[in-house]
Amino acid sequence: MGVAHAADALLPPEPQVTPQAQIQAAAASLDKVRKSLDDAETSDTLQVLADQALKSKRDADAAVTALEPLLKQLDQRVEQLGTKVEGVEESTDLTRQRKELAQEHGDLDSAIKRGKLLSVEAAQTAESIEKLRTQQFNAQIASKALSPLSPALWKQFSEQLPLDLQRISGLTRLGQASFRAAIAEHGWAMPLRGIVLALLLLFPLRMGLRHLGYRYAASERAPDGRLRRTGLAVWLLLVGTVLPGLASLVFIEHLRAIDAITPRLQSVADAWIQAAFVAAFFLSISASTLVPKRPSWRLLAIDDIAAPTLTRYAWGAAFLTWFAMMLNAVDIAARTSAVSTVALDGLIALTYVGLILSVLVTITQQRQRLAAPAIKGEHGDAGRPVQRSSWLMFAWLGGHLTVLAALVAALLGYLNFSVFVATQMVWITVVVLATSLLMKFADDLCTWFFSPDSRPGRGLAQGMGLRPTRVEQVGVLLSALLRVSLLLLGLAALTAPFGNASSLLGWTASAAQGGLPVGDTVLKPMAIGRALVVLVIGLTVFRVLQHWLVETYLPKTDLDIGARNSISTVARYVGIILSGLWTLAALGIGFEKVALLASALSVGIGFGLQAITQNFVSGLILLAERPVKLGDRVRIGDQVGDIRRISVRATEIQTDDKSTLIVPNSELITKSVQNLTMDGALGRISIAFAVPLSTDVVRLKELLLGIYRSHEAVLEAPAPSMYVDSLSGSVINITSFGHVSSPRQVYSTRSDLLFELLRQTAEQGIALSSATDIHLVRNRADAAPVPPTTPAAPEPASHTPTA
């Protein structure tokens, strides 16, 4: 082993292919494709040529992508040299550098232009090949042959059958001879090893993995909900599709390793592998969705009577598809007659029609069983609601139309169309089932993974500092993205038999390598993924920093709560802005383009977003100047409340009735606002009342100031005071003042003082009055008592008799 490594170290390194050489090779490959178009007759050959053309396009795009940064670097070097000044003689080195850079710039520019032109030509060539394939496909589908009911077809078939059997026999003898020669040279070790590995993959490993899937899905470690069933179904689909196909691939590759397969049978061997994968996929999708022996794990609305029957039909469809693919490969390799091919295609088409009819009968019988309880309920028996499945109705209707079209086409002699329609019905059914299963699994997986009740969801919420609802929103968005991607993949799989798969794959590969051009910027899938990762990391890092700033550092400072809120808010928006700029840089969008976009939007911001911009700038001024801060008590118009939150657009004020007043920041900047608690302002209590003119004001002053001093909320400094405001008629107007530590205590303290004032003045016999009161005073000794006045009774009416 050491000698081998030493020998490898002595070998010269492999030369790297330059972008210019890659463009040259792509051009040569495209020329070869164009020359081969004249000899291409079959659809498979055209498919190979289309793939080669698309490969030339991808190579050209990759070379252009590699050369463009080099051209930009060369332009920067040219800019560093500056422009040549006329009349000034430059040094020899500078002149030589200018000449070399100009030569390199010209070579790179011409190579890039050639690569772009080659990419366009390759795309046009691939498109023309696809159109040619489509025309051949349409012509083949529309071709008419003898009807299977025609005796002439079977007469020709019987005449050609001995010759076709001889051709197949000759192909078989050729394969046997090649196999015997390989065994004679290499022995049985390699074929036996391939058989053993294939059997191990097909039976012990496949059945063991299926058992492990069932066991895990039934255990307590599996997630709750529908994810148990969809996850098990996807596992069964994956195991049942991959392992049988791999078994066929391993066996064939072991035979190819000793050249046991003759060149004429190579296409048959490839068809064997493809047919194994397709048949295994058919069987796996039916087994994972129908689950005939475990009804509780069944995802489709199929009862226990129809599930085993539909499973048997799935086996029939899988075998028929495998047999049709192998028969087609053998016909091509043995070069059998066209009559035999037409006759066998007719039999295959009629067999497909019979199979689809059997499936439709089973679905119809289930619909009748589901409708039976409802019919009994109409006659008075207890019936349950009928459970109808939309996909069953769609399959029932589509199946009848397909059977009718395939049967009529086969009887009229359009056998290719009949086979195509029948096989497409089976393929569409399988693709729809697989796509719906994967979409359900993606939705269940994302919902469970980002659920606050699951362990991953709790870990994400705690690690990133997100609320549970935000984590659920991420799961819903990711589920929607995955389901849309799976739906597009399913549509691509449905259109693949029509000859557009290569174009779709080529467009996808070009988008993955060259990116999606948006203006002057090219967005690549890797760049988009990297930008999303950068955005998540940036927001997480700045959220952690803000949490540390608010919870750890700022409480240790001497700043008040308002200053801490301003710093926290500014830090939050700075983190969002920096994360956004970092994300744009990861996308490849420079800051100069962001500035250009901002300048282009300035007109719209000035007119359409004027109010929002004004409030945003006002919010920044509030956070910087802090004329009002968090916790201040302010008066705006007739509203008084405490500031609870200051953002860059609006300020939230909580009034005394516990409602929230949202004030735009521009209102706090451009209008008058009374800050009742700015700079530690005290609250002042003012009590005004009136007493009669005869009141002893000295005793009243001692009483009132004593009430102020006795209350625990009233401050000693400034000391309470009482003033005679004015003399008005028969009353004395008194005004008194006291101070409390906060304006929030004014209302309650004033109420306590008024209660105490009313109580003590009543005990001291001091009358309280207002200037509008009128008092009538008279001498009681001189006044005679006035008897109560009673209303006089009405006199009875007199009636004079008339003569």
Image: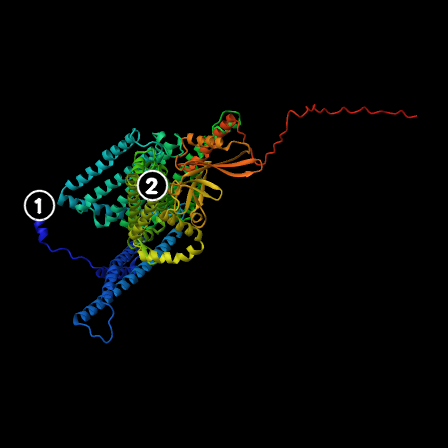
Indicate whether 507 appears above or below 762: below
- Foreground residue among 695 and 328: 695
| Labelled disc at residue 560 | 2
Kind of element beneath mark 1: loop
Disc 2 packing (10 Å; few <14; some 14–19; many ≥20): few
Q: How many marks?
A: 2
Q: Residue furthest right?
A: 803
The spot of residue 734 in percent (x, y) is 51, 36
Query: How far across and down, in percent of the image, does residue 780 sit?
Result: 64, 25
Q: Nearer the viewer, residue 295 or 560?
A: 560
Residue placed farthest to the left in the image? 3
Residue 104, above or below 728: below
Going 42% across and 31% down the picture, which residue do you hit? 709
**Is residue 752 visible to us here?**
no
Residue position for label 1: 1
- In terms of depth relative to the viewer, which is nearer, 776 or 546? 776
Q: Is residue 201 left or right of residue 232?
A: left
Q: Amino acid at mark 1?
A: Met
Query: Tell me, what colour scheme is on the image?
Result: rainbow
Q: Secondary structure at mark 2?
A: loop
Q: Position of residue 10 (x, y in %)?
A: 8, 53
